[in-house]
């Protein structure tokens, strides 16, 4: 047997080490940049998604349907028992989320635009699933957010693990609503799981303020996620032309819209608001200029993409990509990466499977899966 010349061992070791490092880098890059595989297509606009179990994905279509996707076969069926929604403009059937105690109670939560006197108001409801039908439908709140526009309904749902539910509502296209505590528009609401108002909400008992409000000064929240480990609530929202924001939502805080903004008017190069920051108003932790038009927000916790653990992922509608924001130990944005740009799809909703795979819905009526 011919032995390797010892003088060449350092070269072989260097070659092997370089190959291993390159392979590791390529593996991470492949996980991040691999083109997602289509799982379902020909749908409406899949607005919200949540896993019912390891192989079943529930999703909403903005036009007013709730679908059930078998992620192994790609088979889609639709559920009965969905009430009428206000499917006009940006309104319709919006988010879907399983209650933290879903295994015991069976509750599934929904936000949607409800028709009220010919206009739409963002509403929150819950129901249970029996076979192919939603039953026990309960409207928990029809918010005071009606307007004669069909814009800025919100609305995503998040749970804090302590018996509370959050959901956001846009300003409904009426800018002064953002600073008006007598309307739910332009705010994030906090409720108990049964729809009642927690006694420790910041505006309980305050005159000329609605008790459900947790924070205000928002333009149009499109992603909301609760970080249980660090007990913090993240929100991503649309600015006007420029000025999309990631905000860390705190009790009673005012996020400034429309007094404070980083965006400009749609009709010309004129700044919106009085400034980009003012005393008494909470600054965003990240601003996107130009706007990416976020459609969702997810805090990744899976093992399939370990380099993403603890990162915020958002679907982008206007700039058509998956936006990844890494956070430092204090929760400050430490980096940003724009993935899947070659997909050229308006990415609306995100869901993480039990395996840690990422599911993405697009406005073209498709659901994709990204897995290593």
Image (spheres, rainbow, N blue to C red):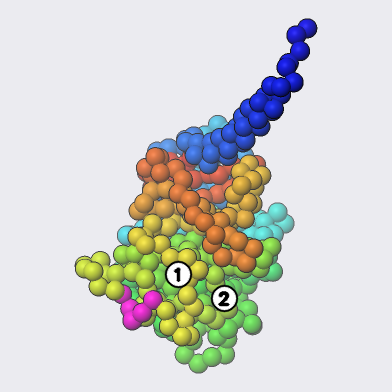
Q: Are marks 2 and 1 in contact (CB under 8 Å)?
A: no
Q: Residue at x 31, y 75 (%)?
A: 272
Estimate the x, y position of residue 187 in percent, counting from the top left.
47, 74
| SS of the residue under disc 1 | strand
Near-viewer residue (178 or 86): 178
| SS of the residue under disc 2 | loop
Residue underneath mark 1: 169
Dot in front, 2 or 1: 2
Estimate the x, y position of residue 225 in percent, counting from the top left.
57, 62
Estimate the x, y position of residue 168 in percent, counting from the top left.
49, 68
Pointer 2 local density, CA inside 10 Å: few below 14, some 14–19, many at least 20 = some
Q: In this image, 175 relative to 82: left or right?
A: left
Q: Residue at x 63, y 51 (%)?
A: 309
Q: Which residue extends farthest left?
A: 267
Near-viewer residue (183 or 331): 331
Please say whether residue 228 is one of the residues in the magenta stretch. no
Q: Which residue extends farthest right?
A: 1
**The image quarter in which residue 275 lies:** bottom left
Residue 199 visible here? yes
Estimate the x, y position of residue 17 in percent, counting from the top left.
66, 32
- Of label 2 and label 1, which has the lower sequence position? 1
Q: Residue at x 61, y 43 (%)?
A: 305
Pointer 1 local density, CA inside 10 Å: few below 14, some 14–19, many at least 20 = many
Residues in magenta?
A: 272-276
Residue underneath mark 2: 250
**Dividing the image into 4 quarters, which one contains the N terminus?**
top right
Q: CA distance from mark 2 to mark 1?
A: 16 Å
- As drawn, the label of residue 335 is none
Q: Is residue 102 above or below residue 162?
A: above
Main secondary structure type of the part rendered in magenta: loop
**The image quarter in which residue 257 lies:** bottom left
Q: Residue at x 57, y 90 (%)?
A: 205
């Amino acid at each position: 047997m011919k032995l390797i010349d010892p003088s060449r061992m350092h070269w072989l070791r260097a070659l092997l080490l370089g190959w291993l490092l390159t392979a590791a880098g390529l593996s991470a890059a492949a996980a991040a940049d691999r083109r997602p595989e289509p799982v379902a297509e020909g749908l409406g606009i899949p607005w919200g998604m949540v896993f019912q179990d390891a192989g079943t994905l529930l999703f909403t279509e903005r036009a007013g349907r709730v679908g059930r996707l078998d992620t192994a076969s790609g088979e889609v069926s639709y559920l009965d028992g969905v009430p009428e929604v206000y499917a006009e403009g940006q309104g319709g059937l919006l988010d879907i989320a399983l209650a933290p105690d879903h295994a015991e109670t069976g509750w599934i939560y929904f936000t949607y635009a409800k028709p009220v006197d010919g206009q739409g108001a963002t509403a929150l409801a819950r129901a249970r699933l029996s076979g192919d039908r939603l039953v026990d439908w309960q409207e928990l709140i029809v918010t005071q957010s009606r307007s004669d526009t069909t814009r800025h309904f919100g609305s995503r749902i998040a749970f804090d693990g302590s018996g509370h539910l959050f959901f956001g509502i846009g300003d409904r296209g009426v800018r002064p609503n953002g600073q008006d505590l007598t309307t739910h528009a332009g705010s994030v609401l906090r409720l108990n799981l049964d729809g009642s108002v927690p006694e420790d909400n910041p505006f309980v008992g305050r005159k000329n303020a609605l008790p459900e409000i947790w924070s205000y000064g928002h333009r149009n929240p499109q992603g909301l996620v609760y970080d249980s480990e660090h007990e913090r609530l993240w929100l991503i929202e649309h600015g006007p032309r420029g000025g999309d924001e990631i905000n860390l939502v705190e009790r009673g805080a005012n996020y400034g819209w429309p007094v404070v903004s980083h965006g400009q008017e749609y009709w010309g190069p004129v700044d919106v608001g009085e400034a980009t920051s003012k005393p008494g108003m909470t600054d965003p932790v990240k601003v996107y200029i130009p706007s990416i038009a976020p459609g969702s927000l997810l805090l990744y916790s899976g093992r399939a993409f370990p380099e993403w653990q603890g990162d915020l992922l958002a679907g982008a509608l206007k700039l058509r990509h998956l936006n990844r924001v890494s956070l430092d130990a204090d929760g400050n944005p430490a980096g940003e990466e724009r993935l899947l740009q070659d997909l050229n799809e308006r990415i609306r909703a995100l869901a993480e499977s039990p395996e840690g795979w990422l599911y993405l819905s697009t406005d073209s009526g498709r659901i994709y899966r990204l897995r290593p």
